[in-house]
Image: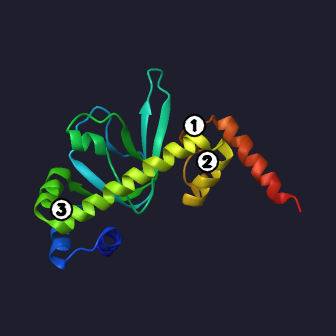
Amino acid sequence: MEFITEFVSNLSSLSESSKNKFLKLLTLNSYEKGHVIAELGEVPTNFYVLKSGIVRSYITNDRGKEFIRTFFVPVSSTGSFSALVLEKPSRLTYDCLTDCEVYSGNFKAFKKLAAENIDISNMYAAVLERIFMRMEKRIFELSVLDATKRYLNLKKEIPDIDNLIPQYHIASYLNITPVQLSRIRKDLYSKKEKP
């Protein structure tokens, strides 16, 4: 539980009593690569805090092509947040790209606790701020940065990404083709090799 206590402390200042109430909501689960934690079309009930591994959110078009919206890495919350809030089916699928350890908690129980406890309410506000900033950053990158800069930013966030997940997932996240990603990587590595 040390991990989750640190996660909570980084978000907000909680009293020991509030922290214990929040921790009681959580269960640690281990999932293998490929495990789906939130299914497209399903009305989710749980939120998640990623302890280890990589989770992605994606949507599939009518032709079966996947479009990755977000990569989640420790320490971050994940799950179909809009579907949780609206109590409607998820428009995205969330699955584990690697083996993962994930804390899960019932969202309704968390919301009830937040309504009763100012510490938890403040923590919830901090989580919402982080979600907003993550989405704002993603929109900015897709709108303004070229593919090479997007790839370099991703490498800063997840330095070993090339060795952790398939290249076609990275390309999908960057909104480019695998061939374009290969060219970008080749160009970057050839620049490194020059004296």
Q: CA distance from mark 2 to mark 1?
A: 9 Å
Q: Residue at x 61, y 56 (%)?
A: 155
Disc 1: which residue: 175
Is 35 situated left or right of 85 in this image? right
Disc nearer the start of the sequence (3/1): 3
Q: Mark 2 touching mark 1, by CB under 8 A?
A: yes
> Residue 40: percent from the left, percent from the top?
32, 34
Q: Amino acid at mark 1?
A: Asn
Q: Nearer the viewer, mark 3 or mark 1?
A: 1
Quarter of the image for residue 43 reads: top left
Looking at the image, is mark 2 or mark 3 earlier in the sequence? 3
Q: Could you say whether the residue bearing mark 1 is in a helix, strand or loop? A: loop
Judging by the rendered image, the residue that carries numbered circle 3 is: 25
Q: Nearer the viewer, mark 2 or mark 3?
A: 2
Amino acid on which the number 3 mark rests in the picture: Leu
Residue 150 bears which disc, if any? 2
Q: Is residue 37 left or right of residue 137?
A: left
